[in-house]
Amino acid sequence: MATPSPGTVTVDLGGRAVTVPEGGLYDRYRMATDLDAVAADPRVSGVDFFRGLPKTEVDSPIGPTLTPNFYYRISTARLTMLARTRAIRTRLPGELAPLEVAPGLGLVSVMFFRYDVCDIDFYTEAAVGIAVKPARHGGLGFLDLVTALKNEHLASYVLSLPVSSEIAQVRGHDGYGFPKWVTGLDVDIDAHRTTARVANDTGGTDLAFASATPAQTVRPSGERVSSLTSYTTVGGAWHSTLNQTNVLAAGTALFPRGFELQVGQGRMADDLRSLRPTRAVQLDVATEGQAALHMPVPTSVPRRKR
């Protein structure tokens, strides 16, 4: 049973009691957030992206909920690295296949997220993920590969996804099937510097990252909307989760140098080591964006040989 501390209230999610900030967006709106109220927040540059995405109520493992989950102000960083597909396949379910950029070479990523304003209130997140082929019959065409590498539409399988808040853990683990747990997690991203640190069970460093932020290009809302499809199992069945990102300010460094990636001791560190990444090929940092995370839907995933 969650015990509310000063400034928090307890809410029910599918029979699980979790605490959320008192007076926060979730406490006030339970996912049916007033867009006009959000637009008045000085941290949010606008809400036009969300006005064209009506929410619907769906049944889920965490009870009836509205989808998508809206993220009104976010910043993100992703370091993409090459890894041998032989190592990648040891961590992928047999139904999924790695996205290969060359024979025997796939892509793995370390990602960090800061959600300053969203329907379930502020939290931070980190991930170790594998780029995979879309779960469909047939091979991946050249145009599909180019589109994926430009980050316009990626598909992934996530090995670890720690978060900093209780509600994010319960929704992500029980509702979406992601490998989420709560830990100390600091993410700071601005136009000059990007830093992140994930704590392990003893308070030490699991994973840490630091880099100069690539030069940012500012875009009008809606000009660049990328998407990420993640595959998980919920109740023993395969599901796909769509995340749409409205990119407002972002930059990329190819074959980045000067970054620091500390692989310590913990669940994320173990997952990253198991993939045996070799060379960093791309650093993507968005100092401002917005996102719509849809609830997972059942999907057909063909059986593949390893």
Image (cartoon, grey):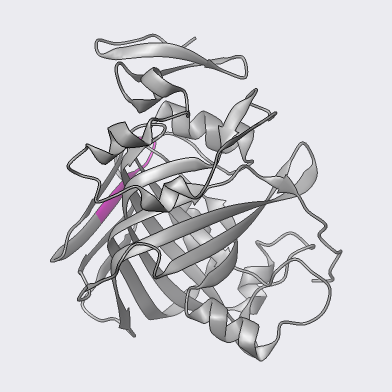
Please tell me whether residue 105 is drawn above or below residue 81 in the rendered image. below
Closer-to-camera residue (260/126): 126
- Horizontally, residue 25 falls left or right of residue 235, namely left
Q: Quadrant of residue 296?
A: top right
Please tell me whether residue 55 is drawn above or below residue 27 in the rendered image. below
Q: Residue at x 62, y 19 (%)?
A: 14
Closer-to-camera residue (110/156): 156
Query: Residues in magenta?
Result: 196-202
- Horizontally, residue 230 falls left or right of residue 258, namely right
Question: Which residue, as the protein is rendered here, is positioned at the far left?
Answer: 192
Q: Residue at x 59, y 44 (%)?
A: 178
Q: Which quadrant is the C terminus positioned in?
A: bottom right
- Horizontally, residue 92 falls left or right of residue 219, namely right
Is residue 287 visible in the rendered structure shown here?
yes
Q: Quadrant of residue 138?
A: bottom right
Residue 39: percent from left, percent from top: 27, 40
Q: Quadrant of residue 102?
A: bottom right
Closer-to-camera residue (230/257): 230
Residue 119: percent from left, percent from top: 41, 34
Q: Residue at x 42, y 33 (%)?
A: 182
Please tell me whether residue 223 is drawn above or below residue 207 in the rendered image. below
Residue 125: percent from left, percent from top: 39, 46
Let me know if residue 277 is in the magenta part.
no
Please tell me whether residue 305 is drawn above or below residue 84 in the rendered image. above
